[in-house]
Amino acid sequence: MGVFILSTETVLPELFDPIRIVDALYPVEKVGKRTNLLARKMAESIGIRKRPFVLDLEKIPDKCLKREEYHPLNWGEKLVKSFINQVGLENIGFISISYNISYHIDYLPNLITQIVLRTGLILDCPPEELPYYGCASGVLSIKNAVKYCNKYNKAAVVFVFDQCSKLAYTPEDSKDPFIKKTMKSNLLFSDGGAALLIVPDRLKSKKVLPEILDVEEGYIPGDGIKMERGAFTLKNNVKDIVPPKVSEKVIKPILTKFNLEKGDILEWSIHQGGLAIIDKFKDPEVLGLTDEQIKRSREYFMKYGNLSSPSCFLTFDSFFNEEIDKKDVYGMIVGFGAGYYMGSVLYKWN
């Protein structure tokens, strides 16, 4: 019995010019012209065109949502109800959500239970909430959703989001020692969410859809991506450590298992940790992908920045919604991040 991705949904908040965010996080009157100019130049060098942000920039240093509709409970309700409209309430029996950073503070009952109550889902097994698994968490959710579909012959929802602006570091003055440590992450991460509707063969529509062939997961302990004093910090050597391990542990094994070459994969949705990280997959000793193979992931980083967990999902969504014949095309979704957790999904359009 095959398991397919029937539908995808994405949700993004208001898009901001990166320089506007710089001026909100590093106001001249607080940190001085020199620090503000440094942040502006770094933002320009990173190259993100627009950053999706839920943070109310006018209320910094307070961290609060600009609009209530940006709350993850409202995001989840909206996405799940869209899927219910597509296949019917009675056909969805499992939901998994994953995230790292959230503005949600009413922890009990947990966020996933609150979404279930809002949407009226009737589940066959307990819903799953996976926080703090880094940017691979969505891939781990897919693995469990596929298991459910195979066992119960019903649909599963995978919802993944992050609201990284919650951790944006706001320095007190130009002498704040944490300015340098946090500036890169302050200018790199954005907010957004995505969801997949995963179904067994009986709920598959007549059109060609991506069939999930396998999910591979891996892990190596590391702290190059971590939090200090409630803020994100990134080590410069992450790009040299993580991509080679991702290739070794969750990409090459799945290619070997299905007797595929990297050139057989035409759709690569690689987590957009940054241009240097994406480009690392071109190195022959890492994976040897071509410019064309990493093009879509690079485009989505430059478009929105690092969305954390849902980043590779938005890239996949762009492939999913192309109006072209894709019969027999292979694709791979690759997620990795803090921890270091990592995972990949191999699919084929059937």
Image (tube, rainbow, N blue to C red):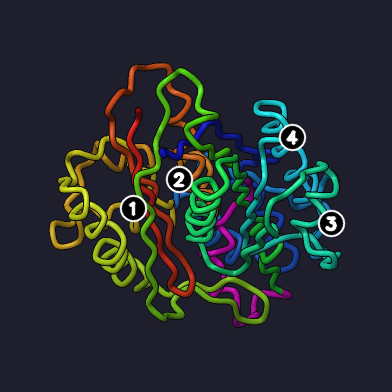
Give whichever of discs 2 and 4 has the lower sequence position: 4
Q: Give the range drawn in magenta.
A: 172-194
Horizontal placement of 228 versus 71: left or right?
left
Disc on res. 301: 2
Dot 4 amino acid type: Leu
Circle 2 SS class: helix
Q: Depth check: 37 or 179 in front?
A: 179
Give whichever of discs 3 and 2 has the lower sequence position: 3
Dot 1 amino acid type: Ile
Residue at image position (56%, 56%) is 189
Which quarter of the figure is the C terminus placed in? top left
Tag 4 residue = 89
Circle 1 SS class: helix
Distance from disc 2 to disc 1, alpha carbons, whole Å, reads 9 Å
Instruction: Provide residue 55's location: percent of width, then percent of height.
Output: 75, 52
Instruction: Provide residue 32's location: percent of width, then percent of height.
Output: 66, 67
Dot 2 amino acid type: Phe
Does the CB distance between marks 3 and 2 fall below 8 Å?
no
Tag 3 residue = 59
Q: Depth check: 102 or 306 in front?
A: 102
Distance from disc 1 to disc 3, alpha carbons, whole Å, reads 34 Å
Instruction: Provide residue 37's location: percent of width, then percent of height.
Output: 56, 58
Does the CB distance between marks 1 and 4 fall below 8 Å?
no
Q: Depth check: 318 or 46 in front?
A: 318
Disc on res. 278: 1
Q: Residues within 10 Å of mark 4 (few under 14, many from 20)?
A: some
Q: Find out whether residue 184 is within the magenta segment.
A: yes
Give whichever of discs 1 and 3 has the lower sequence position: 3
